[in-house]
Structures are given as structure tokens and as C-alpha cells.
């Protein structure tokens, strides 16, 4: 399951193809190509357990002769691996024994047998002493977790990795773990933490087994836009050299980021529309598509309204290049949901902002805490008097 630098782990490439093959918005002609590629990958790696599942789900057609052939090859290969383990235990040292067990674990990963792979990784761990090697086993487990989108397994593996780092571990593996954790956070809708972890890893990225560097930049920009304030966005994203070298290669992303920062709202909406398809067809972002769309619009509408105490709905619609009816409906929804601090004067066709006063809010909170404290003191004094 190891991948060379710059190469995405083949099973994660396969997982993405399976996701697109099942996606309702992918065209049928594209699905024909994806189906052929999935079948070729399953066949070349003798992935009998996965093939059986896909055939049961009608993703691939069942070919019993092929399935029997795969199982026969698997049985033969496992027999060879067991013989190597037995030979290592009898004639060789601890390192060779560990390597023989690891080879068996990697083979189970290759054929898509999740349970046996996890079991064999545990056996390999019991033969492993070095912290770095134990960490590599955790990375194999994490890749399995992302293949199956098993968030419980991913979460436990990240916690395990962190505890291993308390015993030692090199910076390269620590930096790789940040990207794994960032992907986990993004996949579970914790965009703020994901952005922080991605930004920390931007100059040390080596996690090519998960995704290419341009995909990493794509995720970094998307998560940062909805979680960072303007000053931080400028410093960490808009002006970041690592992002500047890549961002033009990703369709619409540069316009999406820069038009937001430069308050070019009409250009922002055009880029936003262009990006929606990429987000919708992304395996990790797809479940959060509607949520992300709402958060982006909250950010951009809030930024526009911050400049005004009041503004006509017509002026705002013109700035965004949309109709008055569209912006009226949008704002009504966001105001009702408590996302925007303003009110609509329908008669005058005007938006009036009513941003919360930070000092007043702090004052009210202090008064409330003071009242709570006085009540506690009074109750305590009554107890003492008794």
C-alpha cells in the first residue's frame, strides 16, 4: 500500500472512481469508462471480496468463473506468504519475521479484505518495536479507513498516532499526520480545524498517497474561505507563495478566492457557480455540499453588508449580478436562520444592518455573570448562618 512520492495510493484512486460510478450527476458515457477502469483494477489485484460486494450491489456484473479464479489465486498467494512467515520464524531474525507479516497485511489490503487486513496489521504491530514503523502501520490503517470512509476507524487511528508521537517520532511523519487529520476533519464537517491543519502543512506537504498537491491546495482554499477572517485570509492564503504557484492550475479557484477578497462580487458568483460541480463531485466534500454552499454565501453576504448601515436591495443585486427577487429570497432565508444581522424594509426596498455591538454584548455578559455570582454568595451565606 506504499506509494512513491508524487503518486496517489491506487486504492484511493479506485475509491474515487467507485464514488463517481455511483454518482447520479455523472454522465452515462463517463460511467461506461469508469466501469471499465474499476473492473480492470479489481481484476488486476484479484480483489475478490470487493468484486463480490460490487456484483451484489449491481455495480459490476458477476462472473462466477472470474470470481473462482480470483479466490484460487488468493488462496495460493496466502499459502506462499504463510510459508515465508514460517520460514522467517524458524530460520531468520525478528526483522525478517516482521517483514513477512507486513507483506501478508499489505496483500490483504491489496485484495480489499478489510477485516483480515486490520487483523494482520495488529499482528505485525506486535512484532514491531520502532515508533516510526508503528506509525507507518497506522498510516496503512488510515488509508484503509479513507477507502471505506470508516470514520470511527480513522478517528481511533489518529488518536493512536498521537499517543505514539508522545513516545517519539520524526517530524516528517508528524506533518503527514496533520494532513490525514485535516482530511478527516473536512470529511466530518469540522472545516475550521481542517483549514488550520492544512495551512500548517502547506510548506511541508509530502502526503501524495492521499491526493495530489493541487487537490491539497483546493481543499486548503475552500476550508480557509469559510473559516478565516479577512486579515488571516490575506496573510495565510491570498499571499501564500505555495498557493500562488498552484492556484491558477485549478479552474475557477483563483477567481473564487481573489474576487472575494477584492469585493468583486459579480466575479465571485461566476467563479462560485463554476466551482460547484467540482465540490459536488468530490468524494470527501459531496456529503457537505449544501452546507458548504450556505456557509460561502453567508461569508460573502456578511462581507458586503459590513460596509453599510443601510443599502438598497437593488444595489446589492446589481453588485452580485443577480435579480432583486433572487437576493430578496436569499437574504430572507439567511436572516430567518440567524445567519445575517440585518432586516429588510420591503416598502422602501432597503436593507438595514443591525450588527451586534461587541462591547454591549460583553457588558451584558458581565452583568449576567455578576448576578449569578451574587446569587451563589447569598445562598452560601444562608447556609453558613444556619
Image: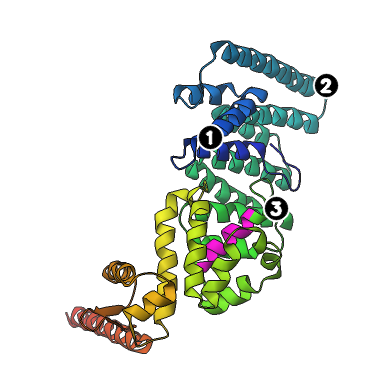
Mark 3 and mark 1 in contact? Answer it, CB < 8 Å: no
Residue 312 appears in view: yes
Mark 1 residue crowding within 10 angstroms, few (<14) / some (14–19) / many (20+): few
Residue at numbered disc 2: 91
Magenta-drawn segment: 215-225
Provide the secondary structure element on which disc 2 rests.
helix
Alpha carbon distance from label 2 to label 3: 33 Å
Provide the secondary structure element on which disc 1 rests.
helix
Between 372 and 292, the residue placed more toward the observer is 292
Quarter of the picture containing the N terminus is top right
Residue 261 on image: x %, y %: 54, 76
Residue at numbered disc 1: 29
Alpha carbon distance from label 1 to label 2: 55 Å
Mark 2 residue crowding within 10 angstroms, few (<14) / some (14–19) / many (20+): few
Mark 3 residue crowding within 10 angstroms, few (<14) / some (14–19) / many (20+): some
Alpha carbon distance from label 3 to label 1: 41 Å
Residue 201 appears in view: no
Amino acid at each position: 500500500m506504499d506509494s512513491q512520492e508524487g503518486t496517489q495510493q491506487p486504492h484511493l484512486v479506485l475509491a474515487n472512481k467507485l464514488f463517481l460510478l455511483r454518482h447520479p450527476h455523472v454522465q452515462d458515457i463517463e460511467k461506461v469508462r469508469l466501469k471499465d477502469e474499476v473492473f480492470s483494477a479489481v481484476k488486476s489485484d484479484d480483489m475478490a471480496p470487493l468484486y463480490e460486494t460490487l456484483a451484489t450491489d449491481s455495480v459490476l456484473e458477476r462472473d462466477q468463473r472470474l470470481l473462482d479464479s480470483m479466490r484460487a489465486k488468493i488462496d495460493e498467494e496466502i499459502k506462499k506468504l504463510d510459508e515465508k512467515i514460517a520460514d522467517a520464524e524458524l530460520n531468520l531474525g525478528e526483522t525478517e519475521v516482521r517483514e513477512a507479516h507486513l507483506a501478508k497485511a499489505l496483500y490483504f489490503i491489496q485484495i480489499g479484505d478489510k477485516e483480515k487486513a486490520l487483523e494482520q496489521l495488529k499482528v505485525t504491530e506486535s512484532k514491531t518495536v520502532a515508533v516510526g514503523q508503528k506509525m507507518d502501520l497506522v498510516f496503512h490503517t488510515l488509508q484503509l479507513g479513507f477507502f471505506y470512509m470508516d470514520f470511527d476507524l480513522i478517528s481511533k487511528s489518529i488518536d493512536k498516532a498521537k499517543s505514539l508521537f508522545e513516545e517519539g517520532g520524526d517530524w516528517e511523519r508528524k506533518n503527514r499526520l496533520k494532513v490525514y487529520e485535516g482530511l478527516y476533519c473536512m470529511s466530518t464537517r469540522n472545516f475550521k480545524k481542517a483549514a488550520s491543519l492544512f495551512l500548517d502543512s502547506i510548506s511541508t506537504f509530502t502526503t501524495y498517497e492521499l491526493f495530489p498537491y493541487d487537490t491539497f491546495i483546493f481543499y486548503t482554499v475552500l476550508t480557509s474561505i469559510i473559516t478565516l477572517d479577512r486579515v488571516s485570509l490575506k496573510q495565510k492564503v491570498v499571499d501564500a507563495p505555495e498557493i500562488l504557484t498552484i492556484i491558477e492550475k485549478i479552474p475557477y479557484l483563483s477567481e473564487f478566492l481573489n474576487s472575494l477578497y477584492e469585493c468583486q462580487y459579480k466575479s465571485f458568483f461566476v467563479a462560485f457557480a463554476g466551482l460547484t460541480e467540482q465540490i459536488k463531485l468530490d468524494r470527501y466534500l459531496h456529503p457537505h455540499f449544501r452546507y458548504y454552499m450556505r456557509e460561502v454565501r453567508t461569508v460573502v453576504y456578511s462581507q458586503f453588508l459590513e460596509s453599510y448601515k443601510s443599502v438598497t436591495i437593488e444595489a446589492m443585486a446589481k453588485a452580485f449580478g443577480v435579480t432583486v427577487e433572487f437576493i430578496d429570497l436569499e437574504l430572507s432565508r439567511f436572516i430567518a436562520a440567524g445567519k445575517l444581522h440585518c432586516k429588510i424594509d420591503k416598502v422602501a426596498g432597503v436593507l438595514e444592518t443591525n450588527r451586534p455591538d461587541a462591547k454591549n454584548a460583553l457588558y451584558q455578559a458581565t452583568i449576567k455573570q455578576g448576578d449569578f455570582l451574587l446569587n451563589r454568595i447569598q445562598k452560601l451565606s444562608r447556609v453558613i448562618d444556619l
